[in-house]
């Protein structure tokens, strides 16, 4: 990561109070630094949804006995630290105005400045999908979901959309970097929804690892297609893989594929994933009912008619792929399982949470937080994320 001039140390923290959540950047520096200049730097280094709303300069960081920054004792920001007290800049031009109208409709607010960050004014991953669907229909031009994640202001989005086709096509990607570039990379495989944005909140607790999230690729060989992305992102070194539920099964498949290519896998962390002992045969109706149930329990917003069809297609394709194979090959790496407080028992004997022990020489189980369906939701999310981070710190020896 490119260093910002005269910046000694910096850390980003998520502060939550009830339903309110703020991202705060703390730093120390021997000289005065302008917040606007530092914000531009952060925008160039971080995904849009991680841009802090506050910047706080400290004389020094509070420390633990071992000398690490103690996040517990960082001061709360005040209004003087708010980076977003900017003057309103009216959207101009047909494209900016169209985007602003869609944002207003989805976020239920008016007078959105062309330079406001979508994820700082009430936007989230589900709303981002709805926004991109509506923008595509309104403008009659193909757009891509990564656009709003990488360029989360009205002005930035409009510049890409009206620019060269090549710039817009570069947004068509099946992966996204979910945090800042720092330390060794970890690759998150998508849960049952098929999209890696489900981990947006999860990765905010990973301050010393770069996290990439992959979407499920609907191809003739998803594991091969997704492995191609990984080896292009990381030319050398061991791969570290993670996944919740179905994402853990996908991580296993990626590990097998990487091993076939002679690449090292440093470890897999499963967030309550069940090993599939034999193929599972479902009817079309069972696949559809399973997909609808998954959405209702985890992402009810996907029932919105604008995105329902695509969401159901992705979920069904993912489940068909996983059901069609068994997990019976040995992986030459540690496998850590974070178990939910409940256990799925309605699949007869075709799946088993503990049977991963037969496929690796190093298998450990850890007690997680919450039930299977609630592990990526607060208040369970934070505990599971911190435990996951601790395990990857162990695997990568970055304590």
Image: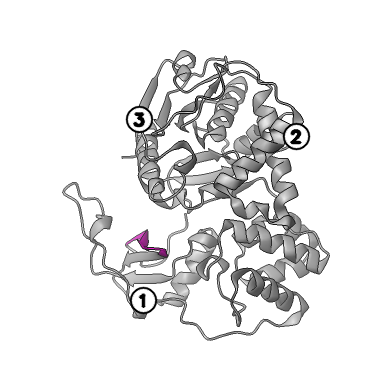
Q: Position of residue 88 (x, y in %)?
A: 56, 85
Q: Tell me where residue 82 appears, x and y as whole percent.
A: 40, 76
Q: Which residues are magenta?
A: 9-21
For mark 1, what is the residue?
A: 81
Disc nearest the viewer among 2 and 3: 3
Mark 1 lies on a secondary structure that is helix
Spatial distance from mark 1 to mark 2, Cα to Cα?
A: 47 Å
Which residue has dot 3 on it?
366
User: How many residues crowd around disc 3 within 10 Å: few (fewer than 14), some, or many (20 or more)?
Assistant: some
Residue at 70%, 41% in the rendered image: 314
Instruction: Check disc 2 and report the residue beneath it.
Output: 219
Q: Point out the tag, 1 or 3, that comes first from the N-terminus.
A: 1
**Left or right: where does residue 153 sit relative to residue 358?**
right
Colour logic: one colour
Q: Is residue 300 above or below residue 242?
A: below
Left or right relative to 83: residue 160: right
For this rendering, which residue is in front, 21 or 115? 21
Q: Which residue, as the protein is rendered here, is positioned at the far right?
A: 140
Q: Earlier in the sequence, mark 2 or mark 3?
A: 2
Pick the front one: 175 or 318: 318
Q: Determine contact: label 1, label 2, CB under 8 Å.
A: no
What residue is drawn where x is 75% and y is 74%? 95
Q: Residue at x 23, y 60 (%)?
A: 73
**Residue 193 can be seen in this image:** no
Tell me: residue 153, above or below residue 333.
below
Report whether residue 16 is seen: yes
Mark 3, secondary structure of its residue: strand
First of labels 1, 2 by sequence position: 1
Q: Are marks 2 and 3 in contact (CB under 8 Å)?
A: no
Residue 153's x, y, as percent? 61, 70
């Amino acid at each position: 990561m490119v260093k910002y001039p005269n910046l000694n140390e910096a850390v980003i923290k998520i502060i939550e109070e009830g339903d309110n959540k703020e991202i705060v950047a703390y730093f120390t520096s021997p000289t005065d630094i302008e917040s606007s200049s530092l914000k531009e730097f952060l925008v160039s280094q971080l995904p849009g949804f991680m841009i802090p709303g506050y910047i706080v300069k400290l004389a020094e960081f509070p420390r633990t006995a071992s000398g690490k920054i103690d996040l517990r004792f960082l001061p709360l920001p005040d209004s003087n630290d708010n980076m977003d007290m900017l003057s309103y800049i009216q959207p101009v031009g047909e494209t900016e105005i169209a985007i602003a109208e869609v944002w207003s409709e989805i976020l239920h607010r008016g007078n959105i400045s062309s330079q406001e960050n979508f994820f700082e004014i009430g936007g989230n991953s589900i709303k981002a999908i709805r926004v991109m669907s509506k923008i595509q229909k309104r403008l009659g031009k193909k757009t891509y979901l990564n656009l709003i994640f990488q360029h989360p202001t009205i002005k930035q989005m409009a510049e890409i959309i009206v620019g060269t086709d090549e710039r817009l096509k570069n947004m068509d990607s099946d992966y996204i970097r979910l945090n800042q570039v720092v330390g060794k990379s970890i690759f998150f495989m998508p849960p049952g929804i098929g999209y890696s944005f489900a981990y947006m909140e999860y990765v905010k607790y990973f301050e010393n690892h770069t996290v990439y999230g992959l979407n499920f690729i609907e191809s003739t060989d998803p594991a091969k297609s997704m492995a191609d992305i990984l080896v292009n992102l990381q030319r050398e070194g061991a791969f570290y893989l993670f996944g919740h539920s179905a994402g853990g099964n996908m991580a296993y498949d990626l590990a097998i594929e990487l091993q076939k290519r002679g690449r090292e896998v440093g470890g897999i962390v499963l967030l309550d994933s069940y090993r599939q002992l034999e193929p599972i045969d479902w009817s079309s109706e069972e696949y559809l009912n399973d997909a609808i149930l998954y959405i209702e329990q985890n992402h009810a917003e996907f029932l919105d008619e604008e995105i329902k069809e695509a969401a159901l297609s992705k979920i069904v394709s993912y489940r068909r792929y996983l059901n069609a194979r068994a997990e019976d090959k040995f992986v030459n790496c540690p496998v850590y399982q974070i178990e939910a407080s409940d256990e799925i028992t309605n699949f007869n004997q075709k799946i088993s949470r503990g049977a991963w022990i037969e496929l690796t020489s190093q298998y450990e189980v850890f007690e997680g937080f919450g039930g299977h369906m609630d592990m990526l939701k607060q208040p369970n999310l934070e505990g599971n994320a911190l435990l996951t981070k601790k395990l990857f710190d162990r695997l990568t020896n970055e304590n």
